[in-house]
């Protein structure tokens, strides 16, 4: 992800843990959040559910996953996740999804 951000000239914040990501998302606004469906025992769905309405509607979300069940896809759609990318995700795929999402 860092490489895609650098390639696109996008400012980014990378976090080493789910807790740090949640803290940042509560205290700052972001145009785009890229997260993994499986985050050290926490799913992207549970992280977004935990944050509830605290993620501004203007924040676009891209999820990366090696597997997402149909029910999870529907849940991501209800949460207005813009894109779910299947792993392995190439740099070009991620950059394309980021460009499309951010309209750059």
Image (spheres, rainbow, N blue to C red):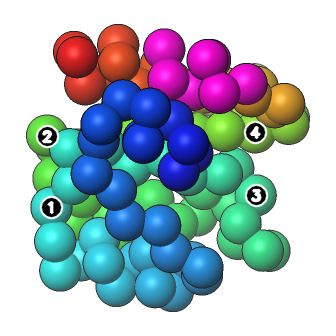
Query: Looking at the image, is mark 1 or mark 3 nearer the viewer?
Result: 1
Q: CA distance from mark 2 to mark 1?
A: 9 Å
Q: Is residue 92 magenta?
A: yes
* Residue occupying image coordinates x 36% and y 29%: 8
| 18 versus 61 height, above or below | below
Name the side, left or right, on which 40 lies relative to 5.
right
> Which quadrant holds the C terminus?
top left
| 32 versus 17 height, above or below | above
* Residue occupying image coordinates x 84% and y 30%: 88
Residue at the disc numbered 4: 65
Residue at the disc numbered 1: 29
Residue at the disc numbered 2: 58
Q: Residue 59 in the image: state x and y as whole percent.
A: 22, 44
* Residue occupying image coordinates x 34% and y 85%: 23
Give the number of marks.
4
Neighbourhood count class around disc 1 (C-alpha, 10 Å): few under 14, some 14–19, many 20 upward: some
Numbered disc 3: secondary structure: strand
Residue at the disc numbered 3: 38
The region drawn magenta spans 90-96
Q: Is residue 53 magenta?
A: no
Q: Mark 4–mark 3 contact, CB under 8 Å?
A: yes
């Amino acid at each position: 992800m860092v490489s895609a951000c650098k390639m696109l000239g996008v400012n980014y914040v990378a976090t080493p843990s789910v807790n740090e990501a949640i803290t940042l998302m509560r205290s700052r606004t972001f145009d785009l959040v890229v997260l993994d469906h499986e985050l050290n025992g926490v799913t992207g769905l549970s992280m977004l559910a935990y944050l509830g309405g605290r993620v501004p509607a203007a924040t676009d979300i891209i999820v990366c996953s090696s597997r997402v069940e149909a029910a999870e896809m529907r849940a991501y759609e209800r949460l207005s996740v813009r894109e779910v990318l299947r792993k392995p995700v190439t740099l070009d795929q991620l950059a394309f999804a980021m460009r499309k999402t951010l309209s750059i």
